[in-house]
Structure formats: C-alpha cells, structure tokens
Image (tube, rainbow, N blue to C red):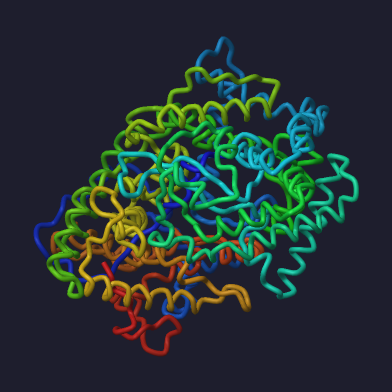
Amino acid sequence: MKKSLLATLIASTFVLGACGDNTSSQQAAAPAVAEQSQTGKAELGSFGVDLSARNESVKPGDDFFMYASGTWYDNYVMPADKTRYGAFTALADKSEEQVKAIIDELATAGNLTGEKKLIADFYRAYMDTDSINAKGINPIQPMLADIAAIDSVSALTQAFGNAWLTGTNTPIYAGLWYNRLDPDKYEVSVGVGGLGLPDRDYYLEDSQRFADIRKAYQAHMAEMLAFAKVDDAENKAAQILALETRIAEVQWPREKRRDRDLTLNQVERAALSDLYPNFDWSAYFTPSGLQVPNLNISHPEPVKAVIGIINDTPLQVWKDYLTYHAISGNAGYLAEEIYQANFNFYGKTLSGQQEPRPRWKRAVDEMSDIESLGFAIGKVYVDKYFPESSKQQMSELVKNLRTALGERIKNLDWMGEETKVNALAKLEAFRPKIGYPDQWQSFEGLSISQDDLLGNVHNLRKFFNAQDIERELKPTDRERWGMPPQQVNAYYNSSFNEIVFPAAILQAPFFDPNADPAVNYGAIGAVIGHEMGHGFDDQGSKSDAHGVQTNWWTDADRTAFEQKADMLAAQYSAYEPIEGNFVNGRNSLGENIGDVGGLSMAYHAYKLSLNGKEAPVIDGLTGDQRFFLAWAQVWKEKRTEQSMLNQLRAGTHAPGRYRALAPRNHDAWYKAFNVQPGDALYLAPEERVRIW
C-alpha cells in the first residue's frame, strides 16, 4: 500500500539503532533488576539461548556469528517464500500467525460492527481471488485512462502530485513531516524518488551483475505494459529505463541523503516557485490538499535537476513511465497473473525469493500497515497476546539502561563538561513508549467493502490523507505511534526524542521473563540501548533534548566524536559479504554506532544489576558469555545472495552476521571468550571503537 511520507518515515527511518563501549560497572548504586517472574521454563534452551545453534568448532575470536549460530546456519534450509530468515523473521512469523488467528475469528463471526467489521471485510475482499482474477486489470483502468489523457506538463505534474492515491512512482515526492527546527509544528518535506530498482547503484554500476538486473528489469517492464495492451512495449520499456537512469544520475548517494545538515533546507511556500522554478507547484500540491506554509527541500540540487528532466523528457515517455508504475505498484490488488509477473522480477530475480508468500500472509502484511488497519488489529492483539507484566518489566529495563548511559556519559574521557550537560539533558528528556499507544487510532468514517479490494485501498489512502489535512496546521501529535503493536521492531524518533517498542518484540529471543537476566540484557537490553543510542549517533546527535535540530556540542567534542565514528565506518566497510560488494560503513554508521553503543549500555546495566556479585555459571557458561551469546543470536540470519545485495546497496543496516560482530569493540568480550592476537576478529585495544 502506498503510504504517506509521514507514515513511511516514522516506520522506517529510525528502525533499530544505538551506540557504546564497556567500562567497569562498579559505579553508584545498582538500579533495580527488572523483575522476572521466572515461574516457568525459558522459551529457548535452559536459560534463554539456543545452545544447539552453536558451532563450537569455530573459535569465537575468528567468527563470533558462526560460533553462536553456525550449526543452525549450515543446516537451515530457506523456505521458498522467504529471502531471509533469522530471529526477527521467526518472531514476525509468530506475530503473523497470531494476527491471522484474530482475523480468522472475526471473519467467521456474525453481526460485527465498527473496527472489527472493517478488519473482517477487508480480509474477505483480499482473499476473494475468484472475484479479483475475474476483474483482471479492470480495477485500474480509470487510472490508466487518466494517464493516457495527460496532455501537458501541468497535467503531468498534477499526476505526480496524485501518487499518494494511485500508488505510482513519482520523481518528486512530498508529504507531511515534522519541522526539524520546531517539532511542535508540521511541515511538508520534498525530495527526489522515482526509481523502480532499489537504489541508484543498480542503474549506474557497469558490472555484469547489475547489467543483467537492468536487462531483466527492462523485460519485466515490457511484460507489465503488455497487460495494458501498450503498443511497442519493448521499446517503451527501454525508454523508461533510460529515463530512470537519468533520475538516478542526479540523485545523491545514500550516505549523503542521510546527512541531516545537507537535508535541512527550509523554504516558505510562497518562495518555492522563485527558488525552484519551471515546475507548477500549485498543480503538484492540489491533489493532496496540503496547505502547510513551511517546506523542507531535502535534496535541493537533485530537485532542481529532476525539474529539468521533467521538462525536457517527451510527455509520452512520462505517460509510459506512469503506466508501468501504476500496474506494478498496484499488482498486489489485481489478478494473480499480474501479481505473479510482478513477483517474478521483484521477488525472484531481484530478491531470490522462489515462491510468493501465501495470500493470507500478504493480506496480514497489507492490513498491518500503520496506514491500513494496523492499529485496529493491534488493539485486539494487545488484549489477546500482550501481558501487562511485560510492559512493567520493560519499563524497568529502560530505566536501568537510562541509568547506565547516564553514568557512562559522566565518565567519558573524550567529552568535555559543557557537552556532557547537554547530553545528560537529552537523556533525561527521553520518552519511552512501550507495548501499545495510550490513545488508539480512530477509524470513524472509514468505509470498507468485502468485494472491492482496490476500492478499499483507495478509501484507506483517502482516509489517512484527510487526517493529515486535518492535523497539518495543528500542533504535532506526540501520542502518535509509527508502528502497530504487532510489528516486530523498534524505533527512535529524533523530533520527539522518543524510543518506541511495540508489543510484538517483547518476546523471546528478545525478551523472556523466564530467561536468565544476562540474556535479557544482552538481547532486549541491547535493543533498548540501540534505540537510546540513536539519539547520540552521527545524525541523531544533531538534535537536542527537545528534538530541535541544533548543535549542542563544542567544536572539540564534535571532532573527537567524528574521529571515533570514522573508525567505526572504516571497520564495517572492510566486511565483504559478496565478492566485490562491501558493507557501506558510512551509510550504516548510525545503526553501527547504535549496536556498539547499545551493547555497552546493556552490559553496563547488567553489571549494575548484579550488585557487585558474580553471576552464576549456567550450563558451563559465565554471565558474560551468556550476555554476548544472546546478542549474537538476536542477529542470526540467513539470506539469499540477491537479498544480501539489496541490503548492501539499499539498506541502512549492516547484514545481521556483521551486526553479531559488534562485541569485538568491547573488552569484556575478549576476556569472556579468550580472544587473542592472531584471531580473525581481534582488534588491538586502541582500535576498539568506544563512543558511548
């Protein structure tokens, strides 16, 4: 489903990050241990870690990922409908099954009203394949007719502005977001998009791998155009590829697009046409109805360049471009043969997925979006599957991590007192959200039919766009969540200085009330630290305690921080998952700071929780060993090579097997597993990155 920019950014920009180092924990009074009922057996193994997953023939210091999960990795067979599988995927599958049980119960019930009826009717419409197949491409014929009728650049511009409703790609995107200089207000963020491949690299790199992908993409576009009976589809597909290549050429690289200094370029709406001329901004904004007087042009030079491309590209090429993206972007709501053709490229060729996911899983995924029925389902999910005790225990863990980070900031040897005061103020202002919203999304006024899938999708898009219009001139809503409770993830929102943990992640292997404390600190504790650390990573650290983007650092402290960050970027850039394709340590820097720092905070909090006592040895493993094993098994995963390539070129996170190696920056890991010089992962003490 096409989401608004606000929904997209909340849900994806801040997902799972942190920062750290490990020092002695004998400081101040120990925080209270998060109470663990331990009334039953741990869900994994005897204490919360699956020891059978280990490959003990691998030295921890040579490959900690394979030591922790190598037996599982060598024996696990990837299901045909997946491109990656790991701890996150397993828990997401569990959540998906739980949501399906909720929907199945509702779908078979009678006399439903309100939100429960919306859920049941949308699911019935999605699962009615006979009706959907009988309609073929007809549901989007009005959309295709509108594209065919475009007769001017102004009409084209209005079609771009209507992409939020039609689900098409657009070279210039805009949507409601928070004002980075005044987070109590909204603004419209404008940037450059428009590509059908995952990233600009896929268009611009001349290796055989990427040349083959482009060839397959062109053939795929021709196939999709044929569903609309477009003449000369092969030639038109070639022209679309050439057009998207031009757009890719003027886009910033990903590492530049994440630089908040470069992407903060506020303008008054009245001055927009003077600063960015030759584009009918009024026509562009008319379909959405957004009236916010302040805008931020996140990619100024690319926006100007794309305006030039819009004006000097023949109108027919743009119409073919929109036609293809209308079919592809809505393929999931059309006949199975259209969906299958779209899947054959995006799923099989581009990602290595051999089979589509079962239709019910696609329905659950569609319905769980924050701009679908995600929160209506989430309300039932929380009642059915989320114990209030988990929220209380999680709150205690967050409190402990906050204490640990506060102590760490006070004892930093590279940061001066003036900056420490500001850092501690930001930490104090952190607001955690745990489990579910205090105020639930209202669906009053939404209409859903049980026999019109695309109509339902459009109704949802109109419903949430209308809510954006209603709120755009009001103060920002700080109670709003960017993920529904049933989503297995977490995020940090810099504008509100908040960390958010949906209910579904508060399960094993991340959190288990019956697991050993070392495991919970090494798993969910490090995830908490990761999200807190996003407020202090290379970009999150550019916002203050109130979420305002401003410099609260002294020049000397900022320089010291960036020197450490550069070391970490270089460390991760040396990882080569696919020959000739490395982790982008600069693009993934925020997440890597999050992992390294979050692990430090969690280790510190764990040690404080022991009150100076030694942790017991369980199954021959010390507390420190259990802590680091828990971390590594959180990041166990297996990927198709295509999925790995997509992650390297278009993702902001390092692949899981390299996230599992974050402990090599922590002194305690070396001691726990007797890692010595000569081991592959060994870093000399001066090469270990210690930031927070």
Q: Is residue 521 visible?
A: no
| Position of 44 relative to 594 (above/below) | above
Q: In which quadrant of the rendered image does the N terminus lie?
A: top right
In the rendered structure, the answer to whether residue 26 lies left or right of residue 104 reads left
In depth, the one of 537 and 312 nearer the eye is 312
In the rendered structure, the answer to whether residue 624 lies left or right of residue 428 reads right
In depth, the one of 372 and 234 nearer the eye is 234
Q: Residue furthest front?
A: 274
| Position of 308 relative to 360 (above/below) | below
| Position of 660 relative to 163 (above/below) | below
Measured as percent of width and height from the top left, residue 241 is found at 75, 58
Number of labelled discs?
0
Q: Residue at x 63, y 58 (%)?
A: 198
Residue 146 sits in quarter: top right
Q: Residue at x 68, y 65 (%)?
A: 203
In the rendered structure, the answer to whether residue 176 lies left or right of residue 424 reads right
| Position of 537 relative to 528 (above/below) | below
In the rendered structure, the answer to whether residue 412 lies left or right of residue 334 reads left
Q: Residue furthest bottom?
A: 678
Q: Residue at x 86, y 56 (%)?
A: 235
Q: In which quadrant of the rendered image does the C terminus lie?
A: bottom left
In depth, the one of 475 and 131 nearer the eye is 475
